Image (tube, rainbow, N blue to C red):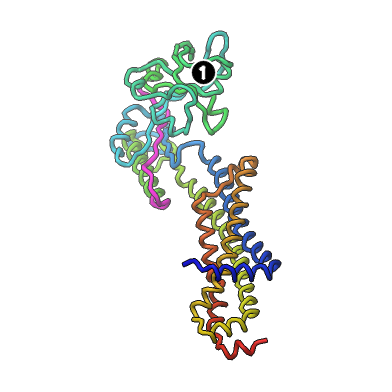
């Protein structure tokens, strides 16, 4: 129930000790201000680091073939191993239940791509539809290569913005025909790639079309996979390592390569590298939370000290109240109200100031490893609730001490 007299007492006590109350509020407000700013800075660092790791899909596993280095089953070393469509289809068929993304690729380097009078040397790849997600490309016009393109051997291409800018300038590229090594393809999409200009100087075509149009037969250059995601990193690492081991064993067996011949067939598992990213983000968050919480604790200790001083100053008043029949609960409640009120108002001011600063200044602070510092509002609100709880706890012990004072002792206090 709302007690107007209690609030009058609180405001009267605050007005009598304005400087002390102000300094207490500043310590509390600065605590939550610093915590939220640190959390925002931590998020900015995390965003910057994530930007460096987003060039390809998370947890990509690539497998390629080379030249054998070991004799195996009577076959001499030095054999060139060539992956074919059957290697890819057999791999997908066997591990279907474990896979999220999958694509085979047939690559050409230094191809001449021409539109009208403009031409240049670029790379093009024959790929499967999932390759766009594997490379983490973003379509800005049109579409990417799809399954119908592969099934029908369509002569279509998705080109990077580097090719579009070089060949088409300010013109629209969609629907136009380009010549790739004297074979015409219709542009159906334009993409960007977080990897930058090197990746954006590529053209992606249906793998089946590239194999037929450029004499590739059923050859493929390498295969890319991602396994299904898990919530736990250790589980994801174990799953990806088992898949990589089983995949290499399957392909080495099919192509008659020694089980331990990494030169003949080998694979790269990026999930291992991702551990550094997960650990770095964890350490950043822990560090900023630790510094921020220590700052808040310092503010709460300040509140507790102020409450002790208040209790000392009001000892005689508390004695009179108890002598007149005031219950211990009412004494505790009286002191807690003041503690919670100061903590809540100061905490809200600090929270509002920090969020406003992040909102105004955050977007202007951009660098390669620091991007868009921000704090989730629910997290910020949770910190305020925790601060109020800590303020109540800081006021409880002095209040409990005051409630235990015997009236006769309190009345003798000077």
Secondary element under disc 1, as helix, strand or loop, is strand
**Looking at the picture, how far across and down is residue 100, in whole percent?**
36, 38
Q: Nearer the viewer, residue 320 or 378?
A: 320
Q: Could one spot residue 76 in this view of the protein? A: yes
Q: Nearer the viewer, residue 173 or 82?
A: 173
Determine which quarter of the picture holds residue 32. bottom right
Q: Could one spot residue 79 in this view of the protein? A: no
At x 59% / y 54%, what residue is drawn?
351
Q: Provide the residue span drawn in magenta.
A: 218-235
Report the number of discs: 1
At x 51% / y 36%, what residue is drawn?
55
**356 drawn magenta:** no
**224 drawn magenta:** yes
At x 31% / y 31%, what residue is drawn?
89
Determine which quarter of the picture holds residue 206. top left
**Relative vertical location of residue 216 with respect to residue 345 in this rendering, above or below:** above
For label 1, count other residues whose C-alpha is less than 10 Å away and answer few (under 14), some (14-19) or many (20+).
Answer: some
**Looking at the picture, how far across and down is residue 140, in whole percent?**
49, 25
**Relative vertical location of residue 269 with respect to residue 334 in this rendering, above or below:** above
Is residue 324 toward the left or the right of residue 269 in the image? Answer: right
Q: Label 1, on which residue? A: 111
Q: Nearer the viewer, residue 198 or 177?
A: 177
**Looking at the picture, how far across and down is residue 409, in whole percent?**
59, 90
Which part of the image, by quadrant, shows the C terminus? bottom right
At x 38% / y 44%, what residue is drawn?
229
């Amino acid at each position: 129930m709302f007690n107007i007299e209690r609030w009058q007492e609180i405001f009267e006590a605050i007005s009598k000790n304005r400087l002390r109350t102000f300094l207490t509020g500043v310590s509390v407000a600065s605590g939550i201000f610093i915590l939220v700013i640190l959390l925002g800075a931590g998020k900015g660092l995390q965003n910057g680091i994530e930007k460096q790791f987003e060039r390809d899909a998370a947890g990509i596993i690539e497998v390629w073939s080379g030249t054998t280095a070991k004799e195996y089953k009577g076959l001499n070393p030095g054999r060139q191993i060539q992956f074919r469509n059957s290697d890819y289809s057999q791999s997908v068929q066997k591990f279907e239940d474990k896979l999220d993304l999958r694509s085979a690729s047939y690559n050409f380097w230094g191809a001449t791509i021409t539109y009208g009078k403009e031409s240049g040397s670029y790379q093009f790849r024959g790929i499967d539809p999932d390759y766009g997600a594997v490379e983490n490309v973003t379509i800005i016009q049109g579409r990417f290569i799809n399954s119908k393109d592969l099934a029908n051997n369509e002569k279509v291409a998705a080109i990077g913005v580097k090719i579009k800018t070089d060949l088409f300038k300010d013109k629209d590229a969609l629907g136009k025909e380009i010549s790739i090594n004297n074979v015409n393809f219709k542009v159906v999409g334009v993409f960007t790639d977080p990897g930058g200009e090197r990746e954006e100087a590529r053209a992606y075509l249906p793998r089946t079309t590239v194999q037929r149009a450029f004499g590739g037969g059923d050859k493929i250059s390498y295969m890319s996979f991602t396994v299904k995601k898990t919530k736990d990193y250790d589980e994801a690492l174990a799953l990806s390592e088992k898949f990589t081991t089983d995949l290499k064993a399957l392909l080495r067996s099919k192509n008659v390569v020694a089980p331990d011949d990494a030169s003949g067939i080998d694979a790269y598992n990026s999930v291992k590298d991702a551990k550094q990213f997960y650990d770095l983000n964890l350490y950043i968050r822990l560090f900023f939370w630790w510094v921020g919480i220590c700052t808040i604790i310092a503010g709460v200790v300040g509140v507790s000290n102020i409450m002790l001083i208040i209790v000392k100053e009001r000892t005689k008043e508390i004695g009179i109240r108890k002598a007149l029949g005031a219950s211990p609960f009412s004494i505790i409640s009286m002191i807690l109200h003041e503690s919670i009120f100061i903590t809540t108002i100061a905490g809200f001011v600090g929270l509002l100031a920090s969020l406003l600063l992040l909102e105004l200044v955050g977007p202007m602070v951009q660098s390669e490893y620091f991007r868009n510092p921000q704090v989730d509002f629910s997290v910020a609100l949770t910190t305020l609730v925790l601060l109020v709880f800590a303020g109540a706890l800081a006021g409880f012990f002095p209040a409990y001490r005051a409630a235990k004072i015997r009236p006769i002792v309190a009345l003798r206090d000077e």
